[in-house]
Amino acid sequence: MKHTNKVVVITGAAKGIGKVAAQEFAGQGAKVAFCDIDAQAGQETLSELKSAGCQAFFQQVDITNMEEMKSFADATARELGGIDILICNAGAAIKGTFSEISLEDWNKCININLTGAFIACKAAVPHMLKRGHGEIVIISSASALTGTGAGAAYAASKAGLNGFTRAIARDLTPQGIIVNAIAPRTIMTPLMKGIFSQEELDEKTRQIPLGRIGEPEDVAHWISWLASEESDFMCGEVVMIDGGRTYLS
Ligand SMILES: NC(=O)c1ccc[n+]([C@@H]2O[C@H](COP(=O)([O-])OP(=O)(O)OC[C@H]3O[C@@H](n4cnc5c(N)ncnc54)[C@H](O)[C@@H]3O)[C@@H](O)[C@H]2O)c1
């Protein structure tokens, strides 16, 4: 199996893409530690992972809080024996056009999506450095390129993540840590259902050359592969997973 006995930390894995990624890593033999602001959904996901035979660990964390994230990363290293892989997945789409969006919403979106990834890396990387190796996968979005999706704050936060990915790849690759990002688009998750009507989702489906909306599994397979040794000659890259919508529609 690809990740036998590897310890993976996934942020925001109570639901959506993160949850399916957690299941994918569990199926590939990893020990899975995940955090989320949603404690109830987190406990449900934890029970499911444990029932499937995975050594799993969950802590409620607000990803914008450095102390909470550090205490979770430290507890993971203690409970599961270190950290090999970090998936910066926690995110929120605060929808609004330029005229609609308030400074408060802008700050909230940047804090969760962009600063949250910085905080997760700050908390997990010291544990990787102790081992002299690590893999980081950051979940960006195609909206970093297109400006579509939830709006300016979301697109700006994700464009920030693309720059962050390249910059920390420069810093950390010489120390044995490989960093890449994935930019999904139109993946069916609670986030999508929360911000778009069925009519809007149908319109998006019509724009996808592959003829369907993406499933979390479409992204989770890539997360797992990018975090594995099979992809280790790739670093500082941002991979688009969008059914062809961005360049072909
Ligand atoms: N679904 C898509 O089409 C799509 C497209 C592009 C990018 N993405 C990105 O993929 C990632 C996962 O999105 P998803 O679609 O699975 O969304 P989702 O809403 O289903 O899952 C996101 C998870 O993050 C958690 N979260 C939110 N704020 C948090 C905080 N402050 N602290 C800790 N956890 C927090 C949520 O509780 C949730 O469990 C996000 O970064 C999102 O921006 C999704």
Image (cartoon, rainbow, N blue to C red):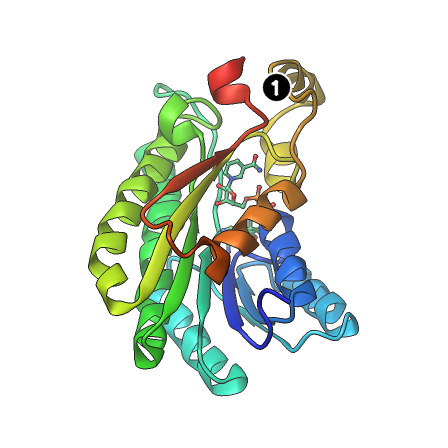
- Label 1 SS: loop
Is residue 100 at all visible to an observer of this figure? no
Q: What residue is rendered at 31% in x and 56% in y?
A: 118
Q: What residue is rendered at 42% in x and 26% in y?
A: 151
**Farthest residue, direction right:** 51
Decide: few, some or many residues near mark 1? Use Cα within 10 Å; few <14, some 14-19, many ≥20.
Answer: many
Give the answer, above or below, for where 215 lies relative to 229. Answer: above
Q: What residue is rendered at 33% in x and 64% in y?
A: 177
> What residue is pinned by disc 1?
208
Is residue 2 at all visible to an observer of this figure? yes
* Along the line of sight, the residue nearer the viewer: 194 or 209: 209
The quadrant of the image that shows the C terminus is top right
Q: Position of residue 148 (x, y in %)?
A: 45, 22
Q: Position of residue 77 (x, y in %)?
A: 45, 81
* Along the line of sight, the residue nearer the viewer: 31 or 44: 31
Residue 122 location, quadrant: bottom left
- Judge from the rendering whether residue 193 lies leftward or rightward of residue 235; answer left or right: right
* Along the line of sight, the residue nearer the viewer: 149 or 144: 144
- Judge from the rendering whether residue 194 lies leftward or rightward of residue 178; answer left or right: right
So how many labels did they put on this image?
1
Residue 100 location, quadrant: top left
Q: Position of residue 165 (x, y in %)?
A: 31, 48
- Judge from the rendering whether residue 40 lies leftward or rightward of residue 223; answer left or right: right
- Judge from the rendering whether residue 207 lies leftward or rightward of residue 235; answer left or right: right
Q: What is the three-letter code of the residue carrying label 1?
A: Ile
Residue 175 location, quadrant: bottom left
